[in-house]
Amino acid sequence: MTDDSRSPFRDAHSDIDTASQVPDTPQTRAPAYRLAFADDEFIQRDELRPVRLQLELLKPQMIMDERNIDSTIVLFGGARIPAPAHRDTARTETLADLSRFYDEARTFARLMTEKSMESYGRENVIVTGGGPGVMEAGNRGAADAGGASIGLNIVLPHEQAPNEYVTPDLCFNFHYFAIRKMHFLMRARAICVFPGGFGTLDEMFEALTLIQTGRMEKLPFLLFGEDFWRRIINWEALAEAGTIAEEDLKLFRFVETAEEAIEAIETWDGAGEKRAHVPGRT
């Protein structure tokens, strides 16, 4: 990031450099003397949580604005779904069968990125969670097309590195799940959900809830793998019970292939006319 404001005031970088060269005394070694914005211990205090939330919202926002990224295509999906070449290593027979969706995600991302490059990478940029499985397939497909893609990684108790196909300067790391999910949706032009586990279900239902309640505009919402989604969720039972409306079942559509998904996006009523809106986006 660059600062072209040409402010007459001394910049923060200069003061950090100067402060590191002051004489070593009991006073300059004291934590109180550290510049507040360069003091990691201070920034990590519980009282500074609102500041950290704001920083985590601002950093990806500013970088994507500088890259002129206007809209994204969101890919949610399981980290445990292997590439077909590695289906023999899958933990279960079902995961091995679901490996076909790795290829579908990769193909879909490649085709969408080819279209994105017609707008010089400003529109319909692929964004994933930046991890393995379906996420890797999405970033890999964008790389196959020679385009950029976004990865929104998160710090987890077990070590997780971003997959190698995320565009390096669009690879972000998060502490707060809530801010990460906001960034998934703030520029969304379409949402594609592949088979996955708790994380995928969480992301899917939060997005559906925002659309259902009018907190986010309707947009193409595609579930890859009708058999999988009908086996784990009885959608009609929710409508029959009255806990959702019958109309809510029209908020999403099942697809099986990359080509079918692209056709659905292009023919969706009102698709792509407006940017998604979530709380906090003005």
Image (cartoon, grey):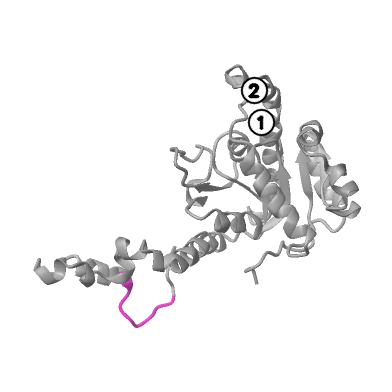
Q: Is residue 30 left or right of residue 49?
A: left
First-in-chain label (1 vs 2): 2
Percent x, y of residue 45:
36, 64
Where the N terminus falls, by quadrant? Answer: bottom left
The spot of residue 101 in percent (x, y) is 70, 31
Occupied quadrant, residue 36: bottom left
Q: Quadrant of residue 275?
A: bottom right
Quadrant position of the C terminus in the picture? bottom right
Give the magenta part as a residue range.
5-12
Would residue 121 be seen by someone viewing this image from the given angle? Answer: yes
* 145 over 84 or under it: above or below: below
The picture places residue 24, in percent across and down from the top left corner, at: 10, 66
Question: Around disc 1, counting alpha carbons within 10 Å, would you say few (fewer than 14), some (14 to 19), or many (20 or more)?
Answer: many
Q: Residue at x 23, y 66 (%)?
A: 17
Residue 84, numbered circle: 2
Q: Nearer the viewer, residue 5 or 163?
A: 163
Camera-nearest residue between 205 and 37: 205
Circle 2 residues within 10 Å: few <14, some 14–19, many ≥20? some
Q: Which residue is mark 1?
A: 102
Confirm or deny contact between disc 1 and disc 2 (CB under 8 A): yes
Most distant residue in the bottom direction: 8
